[in-house]
């Protein structure tokens, strides 16, 4: 079994041009004494939109590692795969985010639920969990309800894992189970039942991505009850530690936070929890690198700024189609989007001020940012026009990419807000 490192950090790279700039952030963090493993992730949906292949993501990551002399581990994530999409990733990836959210709620048969409870009588009653103040009190009806909702999803996770393992023929890889794309957060008793069900599937899960309370919109800060999030995060850590001992799950099993990019307000609670418990973390970011490309183009001025403006104008025109696939993870207020005629006249400073995620800047516009976050299809349709602009402005873009990952994400997560440079 390939074991996952304590801290892993997912980075997306829509157009496979920023792997070196991304990796420099990991080098800077390592220089501060914090080893964090890069995990390049790209979903099937993103590959289809951009017209890319997993082989390209692998080639970009390998080239960056070779160019910068990175000697520590690094991983490539087949992001949010299922049985219908996983095969194209098999030759290239060593991390698999097994997404079973669509099967949550598929009801297990009564006899399956009864058999599960027979295997796990320990789930019924009063359960002391170290790290959770009040004991969990779980009735048979509670277990039946949770099993009815999650048992089929856990079985599917096992089936997908075995499919990957069979195809890779003994080659080591890391498995994550994703349950975050659902309506309601999982409670501690539900998490315990889920982990027992996954243990029954007898595969080495190493990270689990639950649903947390609040909004995890793409590319913008967390919206929700911070105190409740912190309690949920700490409770999940405690349940995982308990399940590792109770069910023989891998000792490296850790929480995964999806859509973790730009969730600055939760980084403090996460860091406090990790410091207190010694737990590991996987956090996944994605489209912020694509936004830093746009910021770099705007900073470069001239034709590059004109291209950045045009990408927004086209995104504005095609807003409905671009937003529809992401409707559950964005909140764009049309009335707060700058108009086309206004943006046509924007300077570099106006464009970057609106787009860069600096909430202290009065020019920052989260609606502008969210629309562009999902607007990468516009750049993809530009083909070589966009890719040639990335190459021509690689220096300024790379600087923004590295600073965004290191200063805005890694420093508050792993070093503390007091070490974060002022923007």
Image (spheres, rainbow, N blue to C red):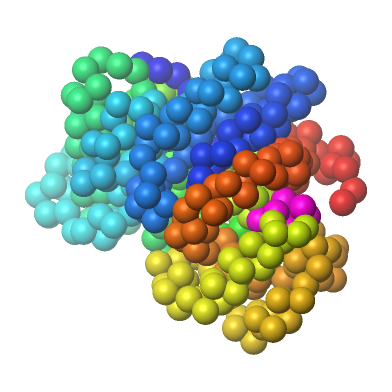
Where is 125 relative to 175, above or below? below
Q: Image point 75% across, 44% down: which residue?
A: 396
**Between 313 and 222, which is closer to the camera in this rendering?**
313
State whether residue 201 appears in this view: no
Asked which quadrant contains residue 79, the reply is top left
Q: Image point 34% across, 18% down: which residue?
A: 172
Residue 274 location (% of width, % of height): 66, 34
Residue 234 location (% of width, % of height): 60, 44
**Between 10 and 196, which is closer to the camera in this rendering?**
10
In the picture, the quarter occupied by the N terminus is: top left
Per the picture, the main secondary structure of the magenta-coloured stretch is helix
Asked which quadrant contains residue 183, the reply is bottom left
State whether residue 291 appears in this view: yes
Asked which quadrant contains residue 156, the reply is top left
**Between 26 and 400, which is closer to the camera in this rendering?**
400
Where is 169 relative to 23, above or below? above
Quick one: which residue is furthest to the left in this view?
111
Residue 382 location (% of width, % of height): 49, 58
Q: Which residues are magenta?
A: 294-300
**Between 110 and 221, which is closer to the camera in this rendering?**
221
Residue 250 location (% of width, % of height): 41, 23
Where is 28 relative to 360, above or below? above
Horizontally, is 208 left or right of 379 in the view?
A: left
Horizontally, is 369 left or right of 152 in the view?
A: right
Q: Image point 69% across, 80% down: which residue?
A: 338
Q: Image point 20% across, 25% down: which residue?
A: 167
Quick one: which residue is furthest to the bottom in this view?
335
**Quick check: is 406 in the magenta stretch?**
no
Callout count: 0
């Amino acid at each position: 079994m390939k074991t996952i490192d304590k801290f892993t950090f997912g980075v997306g790279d829509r157009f496979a041009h920023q792997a070196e700039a991304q990796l420099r952030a990991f080098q800077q963090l390592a220089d501060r004494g914090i080893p964090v493993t890069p995990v390049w992730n790209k979903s099937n949906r993103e590959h289809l939109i951009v017209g890319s292949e997993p082989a390209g993501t692998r080639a970009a990551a390998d080239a960056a590692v070779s160019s910068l002399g990175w000697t520590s581990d690094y991983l490539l994530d087949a992001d949010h795969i299922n049985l219908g999409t996983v095969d194209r990733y098999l030759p290239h990836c060593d991390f698999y985010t097994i997404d079973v959210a669509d099967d949550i709620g598929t009801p297990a048969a009564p006899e399956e639920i009864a058999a599960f409870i027979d295997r796990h009588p320990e789930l019924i009653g009063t359960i002391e969990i170290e790290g959770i103040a009040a004991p969990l009190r779980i009735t048979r009806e509670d277990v039946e309800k949770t099993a009815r909702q999650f048992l089929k999803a856990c079985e599917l996770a096992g089936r997908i894992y075995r499919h990957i393992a069979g195809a890779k023929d003994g080659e080591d890889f890391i498995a994550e189970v994703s349950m975050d794309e659902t309506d309601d957060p999982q409670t501690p008793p539900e998490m315990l039942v889920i982990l027992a069900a996954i243990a029954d599937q007898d595969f080495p899960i190493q990270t689990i991505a639950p649903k947390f309370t609040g909004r995890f919109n793409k590319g913008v800060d967390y919206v929700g009850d911070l105190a409740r999030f912190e309690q949920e995060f700490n409770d999940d850590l405690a349940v995982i530690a308990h399940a590792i001992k109770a069910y023989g799950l891998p000792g490296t099993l850790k929480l995964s936070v999806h859509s973790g990019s730009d969730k600055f307000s939760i980084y403090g609670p996460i860091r406090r929890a990790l410091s207190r418990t010694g737990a590991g973390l996987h956090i996944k970011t994605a489209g912020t690198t694509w936004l830093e490309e746009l910021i770099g183009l705007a900073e470069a001025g001239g034709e590059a700024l004109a291209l950045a403006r045009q990408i927004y104008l086209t995104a504005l025109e095609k807003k409905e189609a671009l937003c529809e696939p992401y409707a559950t993870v964005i909140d764009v207020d049309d009335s707060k989007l700058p108009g086309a005629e206004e943006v046509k006249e924007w300077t570099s400073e106006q464009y970057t001020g609106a787009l860069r995620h600096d909430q202290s800047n009065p020019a920052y516009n989260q609606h502008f940012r969210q629309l562009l976050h999902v607007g990468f299809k516009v750049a993809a349709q530009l083909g070589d026009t966009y890719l040639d602009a990335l190459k021509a402005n690689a220096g300024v873009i790379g600087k923004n990419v590295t600073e965004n990952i290191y200063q805005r994400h890694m420093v508050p997560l792993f070093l503390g807000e007091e070490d974060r440079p002022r923007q």
